[in-house]
Amino acid sequence: MAGLEVRDVSVRYGAGVAGVTAVDDVSLTVAPGEVLALLGPSGCGKSSLLRAVAGLEPLAGGQVRYDGADLAGLPVHKRRFGLMFQDGQLFPHRDVRRNVAYGLETLPLTRQERDERVAGLLDLVGLAGYEQRAVPTLSGGEQQRVALARALAPRPRLLLLDEPLSALDRQLRERLAGEVRAALVETGTTTVFVTHDHAEASAVADRVGVMDRGRLLQVAAPEELRTAPASDRVAEFLGLRA
């Protein structure tokens, strides 16, 4: 199948009886151009699953495949996946343009092509004209926009976002969630978006996968989750049932 395919994936931390299963036999697919949110409380395994897809955590079982190819043994830097985390991890000594251009520097592009790509992405995320701004002078929301532009710059075949808005205040998170959605749709980027906020997941994703205690409980469109939760636990987490 084209796109991302996770087959019976498990992730464990530690060995023997003291080991902890963070992801327990999870299977899911993400079609090309689709945005899937992994939603669940802290410690449910959603970030561990994301890191396993990225190649940052070894699998205790199962397979991760992309466009039909098994990624076992393929190092992180060869997967051509983009990563964005909660703090953005921008380079404070680089201005905005050089931050966004970072992933383009090893590609066979001319300076003009790089500059045009950077300018186009900054326009897309609402930061046109910010090329020469110093990162420390930016607000938290602006920094996350720069981090998103940087992640999109090399045109990753899959973008992995781990709680990218959770450090921001609620009003800003709600506004940025819509802007992130617009940027992902505009670029046609296949995406897995991790969050603990169901309103954020609904605003960003085409489908939402609800996780709890390492298990995937349900995957459905946001409206289907609200109207037809698959279990009491899903309904409770979404605030649909006391």
Image (cartoon, grey):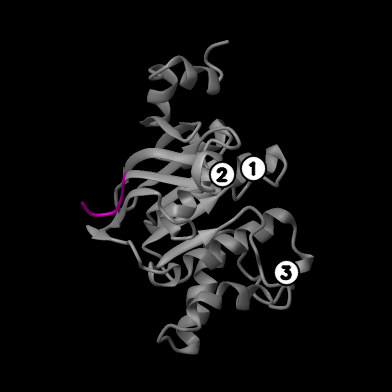
From the image, tell me which residue sits under label 1: 173
Q: Residues within 10 Å of mark 2 (few under 14, many from 20)?
A: many
Question: Which dot marks residue 177?
Answer: 2
Question: Which dot marks residue 149?
Answer: none
Count of marks, rendered view:
3
* Amino acid tagged 2: Ala
- Image location (x, y in percent) of residue 3: 28, 54
Figure quadrant of residue 170: top right
Figure quadrant of residue 109: bottom left
Q: Which residues are magenta?
A: 1-7
- Image location (x, y in percent) of residue 230: 38, 19
* Amino acid tagged 3: Val
- Image location (x, y in percent) of residue 73: 35, 66
* Amino acid tagged 1: Arg
Using the rendered image of the protein, determine whether residue 39 is visible from the camera's viewpoint: yes
Q: Secondary structure at mark 3?
A: helix
Mark 1 vs mark 3: which is more N-terminal? Answer: 3
From the image, tell me which residue sits under label 3: 135
Residue most extreme to the bottom: 110
Q: Given contact means CB atoms under 8 Å apart, are the residues at marks 2 and 1 in contact?
A: yes
Which residue lies at the image location 33% right of the left edge and 40% below the top edge? 27
Q: Secondary structure at mark 2?
A: helix
- Image location (x, y in percent) of residue 140: 72, 55
153 part of magenta stretch: no
How far is the residue under mark 1 from the one under mark 3? 20 Å
Q: Secondary structure at mark 1?
A: helix
Q: Given contact means CB atoms under 8 Å apart, are the residues at marks 1 and 3 in contact?
A: no
Q: Is residue 62 above or below residue 117?
A: above
